[in-house]
Image (tube, grey):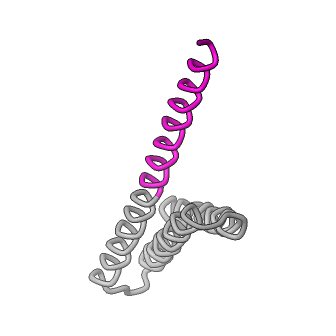
Amino acid sequence: MTIEQVLHIILLIISLVAIIFTFGVVWRVERKLDISYKLFLVAIIFFTCGIIFDLFRAFQFSIDREFNLLIKFLFIIFYTLGVYKMRLLIKEINEEVIKQEKSSGISQGQRGK
């Protein structure tokens, strides 16, 4: 077995572990975080498919390059959507924290008068 084949197998194993971990998060969270991690899970699945096709190519099996490019395209689309949903969630949480800080600061200031 060549170094390339060994590295592809290691990468495949790590990707499968990432799928299991991400699925565990999706199983335990709800609502907006759930959507973000579902998108991450789909992205990782496409990434793993790409690794499998690269592994086939490393073992001299013929895989259509356009299909492999499509898999990579789908990976980056779903990954970007997951990051975008996570970004929206973080912005929403940040705005809620700022509102709470402002409201607690006002109420503390009124108590002192």
**Does any portion of residue 36 appear in the rendered image?**
yes
For the residue pair 107 and 39, the one nearer the viewer reads as 107
Q: From the image, give the main secondary structure of the stretch colored magenta.
A: helix
For the residue pair 23 and 1, the one nearer the viewer reads as 23
For the residue pair 10 and 68, the one nearer the viewer reads as 68
For the residue pair 109 and 27, the one nearer the viewer reads as 109
Identify the residue at horizontal 43%, vertical 85% (top origin).
61
Q: Is residue 92 above or below residue 108?
A: below
**Does any portion of residue 1 appear in the rendered image?**
no
Does residue 109 belong to the magenta stretch?
A: yes
Q: Which residues are magenta?
A: 86-113
Q: Quadrant of residue 66?
A: bottom left
Q: Is residue 108 above or below residue 100?
A: above
Q: State the image coordinates of residue 100 (x, y, percent, origin top left).
A: 56, 36
Identify the residue at horizontal 29%, vertical 80% (top origin).
65
Looking at the image, the residue that sits furthest to the left is 66
Q: Quadrant of residue 60?
A: bottom left
Identify the residue at horizontal 33%, vertical 84% (top origin).
67
Of the 4 image quadrants, the one containing the C terminus is: top right
Looking at the image, the residue that sits furthest to the top is 113
Q: Is residue 43 above or below residue 96?
A: below
Identify the residue at horizontal 35%, vertical 69% (top origin).
77
Is residue 63 found left or right of 105 in the rendered image?
left
Q: State the image coordinates of residue 6 (x, y, percent, origin top left).
A: 57, 62
Numbered label tally: 0
Q: State the image coordinates of residue 71 (x, y, percent, origin top left).
A: 38, 77
Of the 4 image quadrants, the one containing the N terminus is: bottom right
Q: State the image coordinates of residue 44 (x, y, percent, origin top left).
A: 51, 68
Does residue 36 belong to the magenta stretch?
A: no
